[in-house]
Amino acid sequence: MPATDLSNVLRIRYKFQFKNGKEKQFDVLLNEQTLQVIQSSHVRNPEWTKLNYNQCENCPLKEDVEYCPVAVNIAHLIDEFKLSTSYDKTRVVVETPERTFAQDTTVQSGLSAILGIYMTTSGCPILDFLRPMVRFHLPFATADETVFRAVSMYLVAQYFRERRGLEPNWNLEGLVNIYKEVGTVNKGMWKRLSKASGFDANVNALIVLSALGDALRFSLKIDLENLSPIFTKYMG
């Protein structure tokens, strides 16, 4: 897609603003209908982006796929932050079509948020299940917010399955299984980045994502029950 053709394109912009006045800006361009990331042109893919380079244990892609789609799309981020450390301070500004978010945080936290977008929109058959949440992207979400968004996404998906004559799953077991597989992918990507990065910001950003996914999977029903008081009106 030509750079000037922004029809049917959803843009999420991340700005990392540092105290020394420097700024790093990244525009994530997505197909508005499919939420598939629109790849930017580049000269070559690094060696560590090849599919068989520390390939995820549960990867369903076959040998005819040369490169890991997630690795290819995050390669420019890894290169930009390869000399950064996790707790470098930064102000992260996130612009979505509906609103702008800003938070004084760490490189690790900001990277974790933008990596989450790229990873779920790059075409990984496992991470694709989380792609609908990107349309309502909420950077720096709390644990309760993440649980609410994930469960809401999953139940809406079951609604659409039922409308199309498919069997729905309303007990959330499917969501738990999805996050189990996602956790394996996150650990696989961590292995890739641990060999590709010069410093720890990139790697630790993946650790944050992995930890959040594991925590959600193991405490999903408990955390969800904590939200039950706000639904009192529906219990009568």
Image: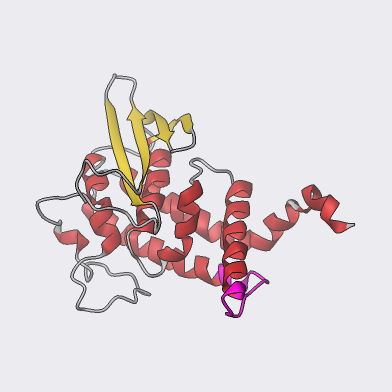
Specify the quadrant of the image occupied by residue 3.
top left
Placement of 65 over or under 150, stated as above or below: below
Q: Residue at x 46, y 65 (%)?
A: 129
Placement of 187 over or under 115, stated as above or below: below
Left or right of residue 171: residue 198: left
Specify the quadrant of the image occupied by residue 84.
top left
The figure's colour scheme reads secondary structure
Q: Quick one: 201 or 45, which is closer to the camera?
A: 45
**Helix, strand or loop: magenta stretch:** loop
Placement of 212 over or under 175, stated as above or below: above
Q: Residue at x 26, y 79 (%)?
A: 62
Instruction: Assign the C terminus to one quadrant of the image.
Output: bottom right
Q: Position of residue 170 (x, y in %)?
A: 67, 71
Q: Position of residue 49 (x, y in %)?
A: 21, 61
Q: Position of residue 53 (x, y in %)?
A: 22, 67
Segment colored magenta: 162-176
Is residue 227 located in the magenta-colored stretch of the structure?
no
Placement of 43 over or under 181, stated as above or below: above
Left or right of residue 153: residue 60: left
